[in-house]
Amino acid sequence: MRKFLFLLGIALLFAACKSPPPAAEIAEEIIIEIPEPVVEIAEEEPEIVLPEIEILDPEFSIVSIRILQADLVVTEFETVLRVENPNEFAVELSSINYELYGNGAFWTNGKGNNILNVPALSTNETKFTFKMNFINMNRRLLDDVIAMRQINYRFMGQAQAKPDIAHIPAFTADFDCSGLSEVSRR
């Protein structure tokens, strides 16, 4: 009986060690469908090419200087400023810092905000007032103002300009102009 049990054990051992079925048999038995991934191809947005725009500085000039209020020492003036826009788009002058000289002598300096809008390829004018103290001025300048003679002026400074086109940033325009201006009463 020992032999019988031994032979039975060996037979069971061989049956347990039987090799697995080939992979082809397993593949036939188990079929799993895996869907292909959906890949969306994004359409390329067309590149926006903006035309090159040449930005030119506005040109400034004094049209007139008028006496508003004349006192013995301090005189109030109104100055008409002309701004020419050589650009093909409107320009908004948001602020201006200036110095004004008359007959070579410093008269005043100042700052203005929300100055004016100048249409494309056009001019526009604005007024600003200033006071001048004649105590420390040359007597000839006072005589020219009293006699309402032409004054040789120099107007210089910087203006902040904002183009009326969305993709163009604001820019600073330096100016330094001079000429002759009449002095008149209001």
Image: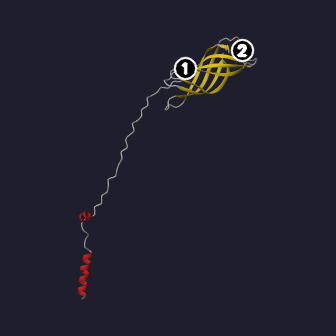
Residue at 62%, 20% (x, y): give it: 155
Residue 153 lies left or right of residue 13; in this view the side is: right
For label 2, count other residues whose C-alpha is less than 10 Å away and answer few (under 14), some (14-19) or many (20+).
Answer: few
Residue 166 at x, y percent in the picture: 50, 32
Residue 147 quadrant: top right
Secondary structure state at the residue bearing disc 2: helix
Above or below 10: residue 39? above
- Count the numbered circles shown: 2
Q: Which mark is on residue 142?
A: 2
Quarter of the image with the C terminus is top right
For label 1, count other residues whose C-alpha is less than 10 Å away and answer few (under 14), some (14-19) or many (20+).
Answer: some
Residue type, label 1:
Thr
Residue at 23%, 79% (x, y): give it: 11
Do callouts 1 and 2 mark residues in contact (Cβ within 8 Å)? no
167 and 17: which is toward the camera: 167
Judging from the image, the colouring scheme is: secondary structure
Residue 180 at x, y percent in the picture: 62, 14
Task: Point out the residue furthest to the right here.
Answer: 72
Residue type, label 2:
Leu
Q: Nearer the viewer, mark 1 or mark 2?
A: 1
Q: Disc 1 designates what residue?
A: 123
